[in-house]
Image (cartoon, grey):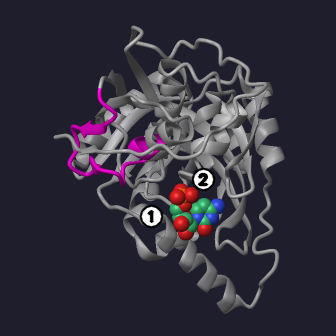
Amino acid sequence: MGCGLKLTPTTHYSTHNAQLIPNTHNRHNESDNKLVLKSYAKLNLYLEVLNKRKDSYHNLRTIFERISLSDKISIKKRRDNLITVSCDSREVPSNSLNLAYRAAKILQDKFKIKSGVSIGIEKRIPVGAGLGGGSSNAATVLLGLNKLWKLKLNRQQLAKLGAQLGSDVPFFVYEVKFARGLGRGDVIKPLSALSGVNLWHILVVPKIHVSTPYIYKKWDAQIHKKGRPGVLTRPVPNDKMLCLALKKKSLNSIALGLNNVLEKVTVKFYPEVTVVKEKLASCGVKSILMSGSGPAVFGIVASRKEAADLAAKLKAQHQDWRSFAIKNA
Ligand code: C5P
């Protein structure tokens, strides 16, 4: 299933001072005309909402972790100037609403690129789950076309373009294991001190879709009810404690540092999230948290075996949930 739209280039974007992005391991297969890339998902290990902004987004403090669950994206140059998207999942639009399409369109317009591109997406990341799948696909297309179209944009330039597509896109453009996200989540500070950290997870996604704008709207309503505008939340623990715990690889301290203030809003409207959390707790998992605005829930476990055993057990007991053994990537 594909969709082709005709494009008209618009403004020019300066590549002055751009640094080349080094080659990464994220490459299955490449030629001058085609790239096949992994597009990873993310978890939020920490998410604090600071305040509502004038542009109606919210300022956040979040810790992102890139995880091994990934989609496969092929990007192939076309002789005509069309951008087409095909995807093996019916849940993903194959038209101009697709973030991967929009990523290609932004670059094509800005740089007056004459050729088009065919984008193929093998979808493995659950959609609308709080795992950043659509944003990751957009970032992968930005990185891939930067190479195929020889644009020589650096990370900052790609992240700035990515932020126009979604708040989570810049994180994926940086291609790091862990990062702190500020602003609306789009201001990225890679956490290189954590690059040696390895975590195993059980990830469970109940088959429900959660709308992120809906959860933020409910968040605002909850704050107004409590009459606490301004600083919306002052959670103990904080993100620095969590980073220290991750660095020390102390599972007990990590459990104390995990925090997502959107979780209490989402569980109110989607009780299935609580069912998943309780199930993981009953399986002996100590560190459990919802990612983003949900409904994906993850637990941090001690080993690959523990993650795999739990995933197998949950798959057998709950066919209506998707369960994965994953690690950071
Ligand atoms: O940026 P993204 O498209 O992922 O955001 C989806 C929606 O989530 C926004 O339209 C907004 O309603 C909400 N949001 C927010 N504050 C953020 C991120 C997202 O209010 N920092």
Kind of residue at disc 2: Ser
Left or right: residue 44 compared with residue 283: right
Q: Nearer the viewer, residue 286 or 89?
A: 89
Q: Is residue 94 magenta?
A: yes
Identify the disc placed on residue 274. Answer: 1
Q: Nearer the viewer, residue 52 or 43?
A: 52
Identify the disc placed on residue 167. Answer: 2
When the figure is inspected, residue 163 is found, relative to residue 301, above or below; the finding is below
Q: Mark 2 against mark 1, which lies toward the viewer?
A: 2
Pick the quarter of the image with the C terminus. Answer: top right
Left or right: residue 34 compared with residue 264: left
Quadrant where ligand 1 appears: bottom right
Specify whether tag 1 is near ligand 1 (CB below 8 Å): no
Q: Quarter of the image holding residue 302? A: top right
Q: Nearer the viewer, residue 324 or 104?
A: 104
Range of the magenta residues?
80-103
Residue at the image position 29 percent from the left and 38 percent from the top: 84
When the figure is inspected, residue 64 is found, relative to residue 211, above or below; the finding is above
Kind of residue at disc 1: Thr
x%, y% of residue 135?
49, 45
x%, y% of residue 93?
28, 51
Specify whether tag 2 is near ligand 1 (CB below 8 Å): yes
Residue at the image position 35 percent from the left and 51 percent from the top: 96
Regarding residue 182, the answer to whether it shows in the image is yes
